[in-house]
């Protein structure tokens, strides 16, 4: 099942060049995924009945070109397959001309809404989402990110209430804000066209995290840690 939704890029969705930001794009992806879940009966308003919710555990994004303020875009999402403990969801973004300007692949786990435990996928749940065979990346089943060995920049940051979503943890798009706290100035001034985010452990209100930056060979990394840097919360590679 392919599910699409149209958006118009607004003021809050753009950077200084009037172009769509990664944070806004991930938000559009998430909203379209929510539409898909609503259609099959596993959306936010169904949680009281299904006792299931969804956590994002990784996403891989590639942007080819960036639409600008006031342009209309169309986001399409679909699920490709499920494993015992996670499902793969793909996204495609098109501009007004029908050109694909971005693609993404993500992994999700199903969570018991009452005790936050991970649930196994069954055939019934998989079939409800109408899995397709189309994949955006050849390695979307296996892509992983390893933590770098050394860091050149480090900054402590305390989590605000405004970052917390309905699952009582930091919403996934705010991790891109953490990135901007530590990356060098030349990266600050432009959007990143290829990135991967691995979400490992939840971050909660009033947590103090450490945001670290590293560059190894041609790759940049931002790593978020907590508990005096003993726990890795997320790794971003770009």
Image (spheres, rainbow, N blue to C red):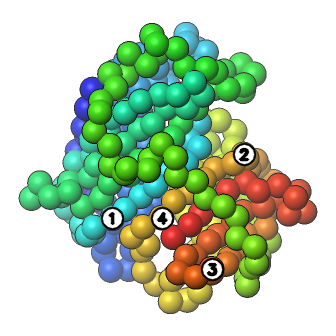
Rendered view: 164 above or below 52: below
Mark 1 = which residue? 63
Q: Earlier in the sequence, mark 2 or mark 1?
A: 1
Q: Earlier in the sequence, mark 2 or mark 3?
A: 2
Mark 3 = which residue? 216
Disc 4 packing (10 Å; few <14; some 14–19; many ≥20)? some
Q: Where does residue 60 sit, x and y in percent of width and height?
A: 46, 55
Mark 4 or mark 2: which is in front?
4
Residue depicted at x 72% and y 27%: 116
Q: Report the side of 153 relative to 61 (left or right).
A: right
Q: Earlier in the sequence, mark 4 or mark 2?
A: 4
Q: Where does residue 151 sit, x and y in percent of width and height?
A: 74, 79
For marks 4 and 2, give the CA distance. 20 Å
Q: Report the side of 110 relative to 135 (left or right).
A: right
> Viewer-proximal residue, 195 or 111?
195
Marks 2 and 4: in contact by CB < 8 Å? no
Q: Where does residue 24 sit, x and y in percent of width and height?
A: 41, 58
Marks 3 and 2: in contact by CB < 8 Å? no
Disc 2 packing (10 Å; few <14; some 14–19; many ≥20)? some
Which secondary structure lies at badge 1?
A: strand
Rendered view: 180 above or below 6: below
Mark 1 or mark 3: which is in front?
3
Mark 2 = which residue? 202
The quarter of the rendered structure image containing the N terminus is top left
Marks 4 and 3: in contact by CB < 8 Å? no
Disc 3 packing (10 Å; few <14; some 14–19; many ≥20)? few
For marks 1 and 3, give the CA distance. 22 Å
Mark 4 = which residue? 195
């Amino acid at each position: 099942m392919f599910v699409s939704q149209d958006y118009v890029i607004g003021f809050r969705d753009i950077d200084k060049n009037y172009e769509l930001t990664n944070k806004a794009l991930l938000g559009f992806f998430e909203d379209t995924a929510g539409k898909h879940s609503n259609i099959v009966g596993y959306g936010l308003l169904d949680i009281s009945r299904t006792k299931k919710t969804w956590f994002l555990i990784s996403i891989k994004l590639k942007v080819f070109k960036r639409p600008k303020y006031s342009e209309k875009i169309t986001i399409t999402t679909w699920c490709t397959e499920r494993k015992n403990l996670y499902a793969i969801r793909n996204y495609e973004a098109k501009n007004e001309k029908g050109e694909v300007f971005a693609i993404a692949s993500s992994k999700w786990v199903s969570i018991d809404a009452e005790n936050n435990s991970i649930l196994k996928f069954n055939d019934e749940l998989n079939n409800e989402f109408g899995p397709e065979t189309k994949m955006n990346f050849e390695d979307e089943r296996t892509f992983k990110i390893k933590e770098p060995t050394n860091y050149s920049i480090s900054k402590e940051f305390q989590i605000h209430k405004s970052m917390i979503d309905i699952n009582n943890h930091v919403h996934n798009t705010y991790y891109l804000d953490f990135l901007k706290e530590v990356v060098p100035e030349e990266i600050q001034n432009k959007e990143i066209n290829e990135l991967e985010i691995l979400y490992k452990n939840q971050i909660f209100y009033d947590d103090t995290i450490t945001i670290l930056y590293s560059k190894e060979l041609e790759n940049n990394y931002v790593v978020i840690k907590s508990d005096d840097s003993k726990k890795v919360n997320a790794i971003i590679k770009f």
